[in-house]
Image (cartoon, rainbow, N blue to C red):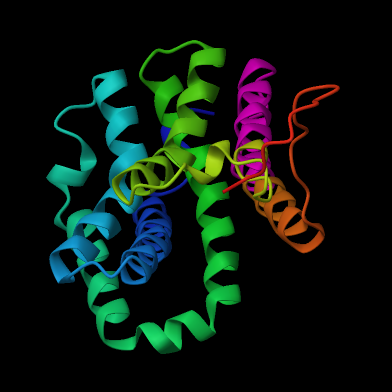
Amino acid sequence: MQLQQLFSPSVQHTLDVIGIFVFAISGALLAVRKNFDVFGIAVLAEVTALGGGLFRDVVIGAVPPAAFTDLGYFVTPLLATLVVFFLHPHVERIQAAVLVFDAAGLGLFCVSGTTKAYSYGLGLTASATLGLATAVGGGVLRDVLANEVPSLLRWDRDLYAVPAMVGATMVVLCIRYDVLTPFTSGLAVITAFVLRLLAMRFHWRAPRAWNRRSTVTEE
């Protein structure tokens, strides 16, 4: 099966917009916590939602990137900005639900990013790497702009990159053995999603350096 046939364009677009919206919510909420003004909230929402995809598209030569050719991709984070700007106390109260949708976006983006990279001629390892970058790149840019150590690099945060790595790896293995179908790609999305939920539920974290003796604590 050709990669372009995995999902119809309308289904793929809908999934992308959903992922963009929930990532934008997380970026806008961090901006509110940092006491940013409305422009800062919008910037953080846009960067969080679109940063990973922009990086992927530039690397693979898919220019101009989809974020600049599809108005829906650009406007969706602005809608998330309005929601958070006026309703952030209510959004904060449903933070658990936002994290669930964020986990779903992680699963969707690691799979779609991997398949798009491969369809542009990259090898399996490079495709998986760009799938991971698609899923987590926006969050890294968000934290850097907000003057925080990226969550991706902090030992005291629940696993985030690892579920995306697993999902992207599943996709390239399916490509390698010619079994990539809507079912197997959906299974990769669900696997990344469930792993992220389990990491949040049981506070799974990556190990630090072996036999670490430093007494420095996380600030």
Q: Is residue 152 at all visible to an observer of this figure? A: yes
Q: Nearer the viewer, residue 31 or 64?
A: 31
Residue 179 included in the magenta stretch of the image: yes
Q: Which residues are magenta?
A: 163-188
Q: Of helix, strand and loop, which mostly describes the magenta segment?
A: helix
Q: Residue at x 52, y 39 (%)?
A: 110
Give the quarter of the image for residue 118.
top left
Q: Position of residue 45 (x, y in %)?
A: 29, 59
Q: Residue at x 56, y 49 (%)?
A: 219
Q: Nearer the viewer, residue 102 or 109?
A: 102
Q: Residue at x 65, y 53 (%)?
A: 193
Q: Residue at x 29, y 46 (%)?
A: 145
Residue furthest right in the image: 211
Q: Position of residue 216 (x, y in %)?
A: 67, 37
Q: Position of residue 159 (x, y in %)?
A: 68, 45
Residue 180 included in the magenta stretch of the image: yes
Question: Is 15 positioned to the left or the right of 199 in the image?
Answer: left
Question: Is 164 positioned to the left or the right of 7 in the image?
Answer: right
